[in-house]
């Protein structure tokens, strides 16, 4: 479909977490939710699409000289640059994105571009009266992975889809560095009055969890104590045979220290239960060290225990290809890094084979837009499990205007439910429904209350220094 981008606009709101979220060396207590609105024309009519994402500090960039507030403002600036890069362009959705994305090698710049990209895809799907999967099946976006990665020549978007749309996805519950593990650890201040679980054992009991993403801190001895404590709680409360993934968030200075952690786990009875269920290890090294050819032997040695995955290091089109050459096998799918980039990496997995894979990782995707679009992406790619942490750190659908939350409950009763006065995610047997993938548009066909959101410049004034 040939389109023209008529206008791009942004709005937002500053959200405060119900409990602090610790990853790496950072504790997040608040972050702004940015919503994008893109209007397109197809030569006959105009259509509007939306997308949303949290502007999470200290993930897209980890510059110790900058404050969290400065990080958030950088992400706001990224959205405005992206709006200017898209506005007025014409062509297929892929051609427009490709021109706007040219020479982008920064996750910060990629944040804004991905936000506008997703709103554009939503508008294109709505204009065509089709779902996101349907648009890929019919090649509506005009996506050609070989324009990004020449070795994938011959593949088009229909070939990148999972053969059968999955109906549900297994949650991997994130256990942050500060999360209490048992109810007795929960203070009155943390408990609050919203009725949501706080301790890990409460989450397991409420949602019947079967899979977990565990954060590492970079010190083998400290990480061992934390992981074995988690393993004991999981063993007591979870179903047998839990799935684990480990996420270092760039905290290990070298892979020899990570290998020492794996040895310590292997020597500990509780630690062995983590290794028994370990699927992969995510981003152990700082992003700038991830592609050092000298680390190839260490990468391959650790991969005998669990394959390694790049996440923060996936900042350019060729990042996954470079990582595969060193011995990494996986790459994260995050909507905040871009949809066409995820599809290109899917094409690379199919072209290379040799155990190359993608995983679904959550940067606190919140209802309605961010969550449902993320679920729609992972459904299209057929990813079997997903890190899911937004519902734990931000309370249910209270993050959107009340009318929008009610409309989402009506449109997706498979995904949301009412608990007392709250509308929350509907998690059954540790899984989420993926019915939203069938919605006309990109994962969401309930109305968006654009007028109830604040202009981005007003939200910027609320950000910390």
Image (tube, helix red, strand yellow):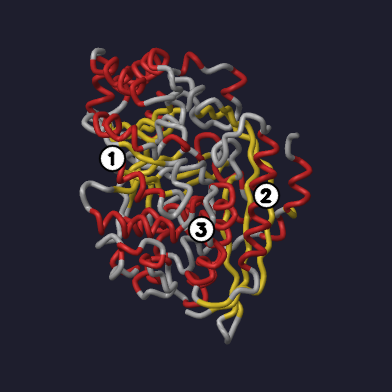
Mark 2 to mark 1 CA distance (whole Å):
35 Å
- Camera-nearest label, 1 or 3: 1
Other-residue count near label 3 (Cα within 10 Å), few / some / many at <14 / 14–19 / ≥20: few
* x and y percentages locating residue 351 in the rendered image: 25, 59
Q: Are marks 2 and 1 in contact (CB under 8 Å)?
A: no
Q: Callout 3: helix, strand or loop?
A: helix
Q: Which residue is mark 2?
A: 76
Q: Quadrant of residue 167?
A: bottom left
Q: Residue at x 39, y 28 (%)?
A: 214
Q: Which residue is mark 1?
A: 327
Relative to 365, residue 154 above or below: below
Q: Callout 2: helix, strand or loop?
A: helix
- Horizontal side of residue 23 vs 277, given as left or right: right
Q: Which residue is mark 3?
A: 410
Foreground of the two, 254 or 51: 254
Q: Looking at the image, is mark 2 or mark 1 earlier in the sequence?
A: 2
- Horizontal side of residue 309 vs 43, given as left or right: left
Mark 2 to mark 3 CA distance (whole Å):
32 Å
């Amino acid at each position: 479909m040939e389109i023209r981008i008529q206008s791009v606009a942004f709005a937002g709101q500053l959200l405060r977490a119900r409990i602090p979220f610790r990853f790496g060396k950072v504790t997040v207590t608040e972050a702004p939710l940015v919503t994008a609105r893109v209007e397109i024309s197809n030569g006959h009519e105009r259509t509007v699409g939306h997308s949303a994402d949290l502007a999470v500090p200290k993930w897209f960039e980890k510059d110790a000289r900058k404050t969290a507030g400065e990080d958030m403002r950088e992400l706001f600036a990224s959205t405005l640059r992206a709006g200017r890069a898209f506005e007025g362009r014409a062509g297929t959705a892929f051609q427009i994105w490709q021109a706007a994305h040219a020479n982008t090698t920064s996750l910060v710049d990629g944040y804004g571009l991905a936000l506008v990209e997703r709103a554009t895809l939503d508008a294109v799907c709505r204009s065509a009266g089709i779902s996101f999967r349907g648009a890929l099946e019919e090649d509506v976006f005009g996506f050609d992975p070989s324009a990004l990665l020449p070795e994938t020549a011959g593949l088009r978007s229909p070939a990148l889809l999972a053969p059968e749309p999955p109906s549900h996805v297994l949650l991997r519950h994130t256990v942050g560095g500060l999360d209490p593990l048992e109810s007795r650890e929960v203070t009155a201040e943390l408990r609050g009055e919203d009725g949501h679980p706080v301790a890990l054992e409460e989450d397991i009991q409420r949602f019947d969890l079967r899979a977990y993403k565990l954060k590492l801190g970079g010190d083998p001895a400290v990480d061992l104590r934390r992981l074995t404590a988690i393993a004991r709680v999981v063993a007591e409360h979870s179903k047998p045979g839990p799935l684990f993934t480990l996420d270092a968030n760039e905290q290990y200075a070298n892979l020899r220290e990570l290998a020492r952690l794996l040895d310590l786990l292997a020597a500990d009875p509780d630690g062995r239960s983590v290794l028994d269920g370990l699927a992969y290890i995510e981003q152990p090294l700082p992003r700038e060290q991830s592609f050092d050819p000298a680390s190839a032997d260490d990468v391959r040695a650790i991969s005998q225990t669990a394959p390694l995955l790049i996440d923060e290091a996936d900042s350019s089109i060729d990042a996954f290809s470079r990582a595969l050459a060193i011995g990494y096998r996986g790459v994260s799918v995050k909507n905040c890094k871009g949809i066409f980039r995820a599809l290109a990496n899917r094409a690379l997995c199919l072209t290379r084979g040799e155990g190359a894979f993608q995983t679904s990782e959550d940067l606190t995707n919140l209802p309605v837009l961010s969550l449902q679009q993320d679920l729609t992406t992972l459904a299209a790619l057929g990813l079997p499990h997903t890190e899911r942490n937004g519902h734990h750190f931000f309370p249910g659908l209270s993050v959107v205007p009340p009318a929008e939350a009610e409309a989402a409950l009506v449109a997706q009763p498979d995904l949301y439910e009412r608990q007392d006065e709250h509308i929350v995610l509907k998690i059954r047997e540790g899984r989420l429904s993926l019915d939203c993938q069938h919605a006309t548009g990109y994962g969401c066909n309930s109305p968006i209350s654009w007028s109830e959101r604040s202009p981005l410049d007003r939200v910027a004034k609320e950000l910390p220094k």
